[in-house]
Image: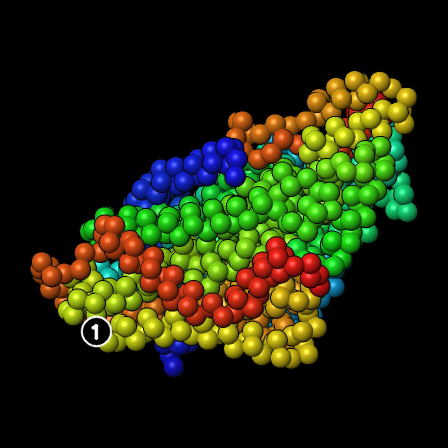
Amino acid sequence: MDLYGWMQLALFLGLLLLVTRPMGVYLYRVLDPEGKTFLDPVLKPVERLIYRLMRVDPRSEQDWKRYAVSLLMFSLVGTVFTYAVLRLQHLLQLNPQRVGPVSEHLAFNTAVSFVSNTNWQSYGGESTMSYLSQMVALAFHNFVSAASGIAVAAALVRGIARHTAKTVGNFLVDLVRATLYLLLPLCLLYALFLVSQGMIQNFKPYETARLVEPTAEKTQIIVQGPMASQVAIKMLGTNGGGYTNANAAHPYENPTPLTNFLQIFSIFLIPSGLTYYLGKMVKNRKHGWSVWGAMAVLFLAGVLLCWWAEGAGNPRLHALGVDPAGGNMEGKEVRFGIFASALFATVTTDASCGAVNSMHDSFTPLGGLVPLLNMHLGEVVFGGVGTGLYGMLVFVILTVFLAGLMVGRTPEYLGKKIDSYDVKVSAIAVLLLIFDIMVFTAWAVVSDWGLAGRSNAGPHGFSEILYAFSSATANNGSAFAGLTANTWWYNTTLAFAMLIGRFFFIVPVLALAGNMAKKKVVPESGGSFPVSGVTFVLLLVGTVLIVGVLSFFPAISLGPIVEHFLMVRSNAIF
Amino acid sequence: MKDLFAELRASIAATLLLAVLCCGIYPAVVWGIAQVVFPGKANGSLVKVDGKVAGSSLLGQGFTAPKYFHPRPSAAGQGYDAAGSSGTNLGPTSRKLIGDVQQRVADYRTENGLPPDALVPVDAVTSSASGLDPHISPANANLQAGRVASARGIPKEEVLRKIRAHTEGRYLGILGEPRVNVLTLNLSLDGKL
């Protein structure tokens, strides 16, 4: 854990702190249909035109059920759209490599994967997808699944901020405004910056280079295509679906340490701003910052453990004469080194991003435990755009409820009484995800189709399967990528895990939003539980950890933990 | 039912309109500006030798001859396949990983005339994440300098100077790690850069 790592960590957290308020204020304007932004002169006419063509009145609002129906319908249309493009890509334009149609189960898995903001990839982008599929079928969802996440977060925050109200906003209006005023302008600048650092953006066929030292191969085929426009939204929208198989480890997809730093930073940019949006909306900025603080604590714990484990390296290799000073560089790039790889792995799973700049499958057991556990905690550490905030707010409700139980008073949250309905839907949301991961993993590890996918034997093979279903359920998309998942069974089961993880969480959250909006506000009294300050932060961190760690401790014991002890205390190899 | 139909209609309209914006206009604008302002980078930072493409300065290439610096082991295709990026995805207690590294450590010591107990830089014997890592660590490059110098019959000092010229430092002195670009270093040793 060298000085340069500490400096990068300080810079990262410092910059994040700095952008949270301006980002939050901007989000406040974007998520208010009447809000004014500096982009209005250009974008307002476009926005009006879209509403007119959709036949949507931007001033009309929806109750939570109608909001949910809109979201589900839009997601369904998007799934069909993407499935169709993938199946027909060989007949469509922009396919200079003449790649064939995507198989039925892979197209289904991929469509669900991008609709649910997971971006799990059972395929290698450069060998499977045409430029059109990348740009239209996949990048479309990078935008709109991110915007949908923001919309749901906005609906929940409105529900909390309003009282005696029936409605929580209008889904299509939230969707359009988040895409138009937030994601598109940021991506435009970001993509151009990425090109300036060496990321490709063209429509040429793959390049053929004559090798400098010809061996059995005489040439090197070099991937091309419209990469920068896709990578910008892939990071900013916490999607994470790589243009190439190696994702952000590919030198084109992440050319320099500066692009690496900004890619990590852009994962947290919007989620961090959303905590400020929360504080501003509920007129309790300290609450927003306390949620930010709890997230920062969990983030630091993860990154420090991962950094330490990867820096300590693999003692089995040290015994062979490998210099221990270099840490664990298997599956890592020299330009990033240990710290920037550990930071990326932690942040991409704190959020529901799932892009990787190093291969998590080759991490040390404890280094790989951090991304796995982050997903088990529900990706509420800043989290995905929108999903992180509404996930954390579910934990806030549970925390307030637990605190109420401890002191024996009716739990209150920001002046509203928390009733059994709120606690039930929150608990259902959390438990369904745990159930989803556990049941699918258990099924896979006792099935031939499940075991056949492993590329590593022993406890690491179990970790590969557990990681896959955790990643799918948590809508992350990163993998212990040795797993061969492009089979009918894996593609289908993972697709259902993703659907459950996304929509069986969103619907209870919207129900919570609707119920919160209905409530009356009771004046705060001396007995009200304060939702800001150190006590609240610690209780919130504790609740997240207890739910996540207690649920998954048996599973992670069988995987990373036993593997760690085998690595340091035995000579067992698999 | 009428409501659902209205939702469906609006959803289809939203899908088409946002697709035009996010998947048509946006990438096209990025493409247009990128091709005008950063044409070399937008097209892959290609390196040309005698007017023909010899690779990309961002992507690694395989080298095995003693007169060239050797890159890291690669798991992309048959090695450095720039249309099939991949890591090994081997776990830390993998029999294959440990066997491979044992072999590579022995080979590295032999090739570079190192004593049998010499510590070997970790990047020299482990595969990168992409299989296309263009870089090696300065420590790894320095250990290979003697072999390259004697294979080329030039003073080691000159090779070390070339290494320094192709070493990139941390960005702003903070971000990332110091590194040596193997392809451009080898091309410059051949006098082709």
Percent x, y of residue B53:
81, 36
Percent x, y of residue A118:
52, 62
Image point 58% across, 58% down: which residue? A564
Percent x, y of residue A204:
72, 45
Image point 29% across, 67% down: which residue? A398
Residue hosting label 1? A419
Q: Is residue A520 left or right of residue B65?
A: left
A258 or A88: nearer the viewer:
A258
Image point 73% across, 42% down: which residue? A321
Q: Residues within 10 Å of mark 1 (few under 14, many from 20)?
A: some
Q: Is residue A226 left or right of residue A515?
A: right
A344 or B84: nearer the viewer:
A344
Q: Residue furthest bottom?
A: B1
The picture quadrant where one finds residue B113 is: top right
Q: Subunit of mark 1? A: A
- Examine the rendering and report whether any part of residue A435 can be seen: yes
